[in-house]
Amino acid sequence: MNGVERRGFQAQMTLKYCQGRARLAQTVFGWGRENIKLGLAEKRTGIICVGLQSAFSTAKRCQDKQPLVALPLR
């Protein structure tokens, strides 16, 4: 699960089980409160936040480096 998917899941569970309260979700589930807040904001606004590291990283993905190794996974 990547960052966007994880934050979306955390936001859904926070809304469903913790009345949308990030601090309560942090206590109940042990997730980072900042991630939960960001997921709730993404869900509310529809704007997906991309971190600078992933947006500007020059590292190639494993699938791009070794396509034969990743082929059975597809």
Image (tube, rainbow, N blue to C red):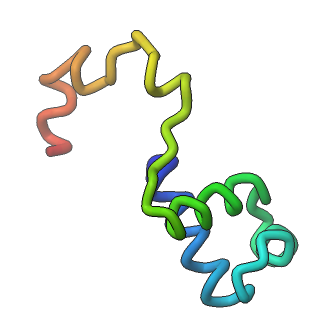
Name the residue located 33 percent from the left edge and 15 percent from the top edge. Answer: 60
Q: Is residue 5 above or below residue 52?
A: below
Which quadrant would residue 35 be assigned to in this image? Answer: bottom right
Q: Which residue is situated farthest in the front direction here?
A: 45
Residue 2 in the image, given as x and y percentages of width and height: 45, 48
Q: Residue furthest top?
A: 58
Taking 7 as reference, is 74 left or right? Answer: left
The residue at the point 50 percent across, 63 percent down is 45
Q: In screen coordinates, is 30 left or right of 58?
A: right
**Image quadrant in which the C terminus is located:** top left
Left-right relation of 66 to 9? left
In the rendered image, the vertical position of residue 49 relative to residue 16, given as above or below: above
* The image quarter in which residue 65 lies: top left
Residue in front for this viewpoint, 24 or 64? 24
Left or right of residue 30, residue 47 in this image: left
Residue at screen point 55% across, 77% down: 12
From this view, report whether residue 66 is shown above or below residue 17: above
Residue at (40% x, 10% y) in the render: 58
In the rendered image, residue 44, in percent from the top left (x then y), is placed at 53, 69
Placement of 49 over or under 52, stated as above or below:
below
Q: Position of residue 30 (x, y in %)?
A: 79, 65
Give percent across and percent down for residue 69.
Answer: 20, 26
> Front-most of 74 and 55?
55
Q: How many marks?
A: 0
Taking depth in this image into account, of 70 and 55 the one nearest to the observer is 55
